[in-house]
Image (spheres, rainbow, N blue to C red):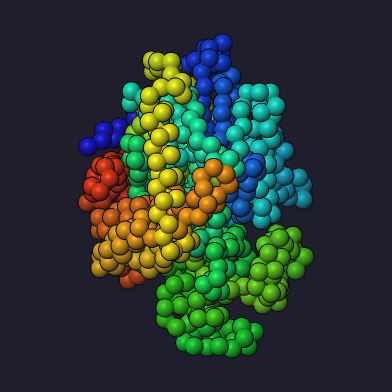
Amino acid sequence: MLDLNAKTPSGPLEQKWDQHRFSMKLVNPANKRRHSVIVVGAGLAGASAAATMSELGYNVSCFVYHDTPRRAHSIAAQGGINAAKNYQNDGDSIRRLFYDTIKGGDFRAREANVYRLAQLSVNIIDQCVAQGVPFAREYGGLLANRSFGGAQVSRTFYARGQTGQQLLLGAYSALERQIALKGVQMHTFEEMLDVVVVDGHARGIVTRNLLTGKISSHAADAVVLATGGYGNVFYLSTNAMLSNTTATWRAYKKGAAFANPCYTQIHPTCIPVSGDHQSKLTLMSESLRNDGRVWVPIKRGDNRAPSAIPEAERDYFLERKYPSFGNLAPRDISSRAAKEACDDGRGVGPGGLGVYLDFADAIKRLGKDTIAERYGNLFDMYQRITDENPYERPMRIYPAVHYTMGGLWVDYNLMSTIPGLHVAGEANFSDHGANRLGASALMQGLADGYFVLPYTIGDYIASTKLAKVDNTHAEFKAAEESVRAQTKRFLEIKGKRSVDSFHKELGKIMWEYCGMARTQEGLTKALELIAALKGEFWSNVNVPGSGDNLNQALENAGRVADFIELGELMCRDALAREESCGGHFRVEYQDAGEAKRNDDDFAYVAAWEFAGEGKPPILNKEPLVYENVHLSTRSYK
């Protein structure tokens, strides 16, 4: 069993982070250049961490499998970033953002981590404005805000519908500056395939160059994984197609606990699936629900055009069910409500898998130009994909996999159960509990990279006696040989099925049995199906070509093999958690369609430990203690 010491500081909640920073050990500025840090990933968390660590004086190596850090999936975030600035004077505060986040996660996150996130949110906006991020502004020049789900205040800063892109360009510019100053050594087209552990500490990684096939290892004093989430285990998701779990999964198999893997987020506003030919889905920002109204016909099977359905025959079901929050109810609740309407036979569009997001009232009230100014790029994107004009006809939306709240377990210092291996952004589990509120992912990634890791990594280096290690060490050679052996195994199978066909089949199993609604019977069946799929994969997958050059089938084989194993762990976790909370909805545990938690038995973080190939993983539990909020049934009515 693992020792899950969260290292949460003592003292009042509001003072924990300040006291902790003061108690940390420091590295003398002149000594920082003697230490090296590896950062894997260059999205918001990775780019900000690499740039900041280099700015402090550390020697940083940053690895991405893209041709440039600008390809990171952070660029796809649309709606905005939360911060408790209270510029609207509408009652917001650090305490309120903290509570909204805890409540939004259905009371399944650590208090201390979430409060720190709320504290740091105000610093993030200042940092990004200083970098030149073009946040929207009001007429007088002040930064503008809008509302997002799960909050009754306007605290979301935004740059039209491309906030992630603009924030990433800010972090990217900081990173490129450090690259030019030779503080960061940038490695492109390098995919991390293993973590190297020496004397119980993470001391480096093994990578494969995607263009040449060369397998190499790299040593450092500390390693940061900022590699994003695992939503593509479902095959169809809003994630970029290359997004994968390989870095975190290989770390899990080296001793890093995987926390709450069943906590996955289904986003309510995505363009519906149009057929089996699709390989990904498209997000329509949650910000659209500020002005768009969600509805379905009251009558089952009503196939009339939306304009032909009068108001009296429409069901604005979010406004009806959750009047206090209306169309800005949290994502998990809104997604289940949309599914419920479609399951009732009132869905719209092909197959009845869609609900309307209607802007007619907003256009009438504010004018088309104002709506275009707020959401123009999103409307254009929707029209290009669907060939329907959302200014004239309601959008059709349906829930889709978007984000994963689970990830590698980390303590208050963002360090995993492998000393020296830090995990940032969506790759860790730390801040969002069982459901992430909209506009909080960008907040977490930048808080981790700019404001947390620079302190905690320094403390780790200053507090730990690290022997000099380079990539000639036996552990590095062993890890390289393990990667080569797996590559050889893939190429020697020479089966009859493509890698993609296995991924698609896995996705269907996961969506059917471990998606929006889960049951004991379904999860048990999923485990049987995944085990059979895994057996067939390793005996019948076809990976053409060689490992000595660009081979996308080989790349994908490794990623899908990891997804299959992760899918099994997700189902185990969902089966073991006999309650409903946030994005984890067990049909057996509900109260009139709402999630029914069991705080007596399941108020814990499930941290799964790898026990060896062919052996069931070990469940470790970190109890969640609430001293500053009252555990209550989440209500948005």
Image quadrant containing the N terminus? top left
Q: Is residue 486 above or below residue 467?
A: below
Occupied quadrant, residue 564: bottom left
Is 599 left or right of 92, judged from the image as shown?
A: left
Image quadrant containing the C terminus? bottom left
Look at 43% across and 39% down and name the residue there: 484
The answer, for residue 458, to whether it is visible in the render is yes
List x then y, in percent, for residue 155. Answer: 58, 49
List x then y, in percent, for residue 214. Answer: 53, 37
Is 180 left or right of 151, judged from the image as shown?
A: right
Is 285 left or right of 225, judged from the image as shown?
A: right
List x then y, in percent, for residue 515. Answer: 39, 64
Look at 39% across and 41% down and name the residue there: 485
Look at 27% across and 66% down and name the residue there: 525
Look at 70% across and 27% down and name the residue there: 180
Q: Is 214 or 585 nearer to us in this picture?
A: 214
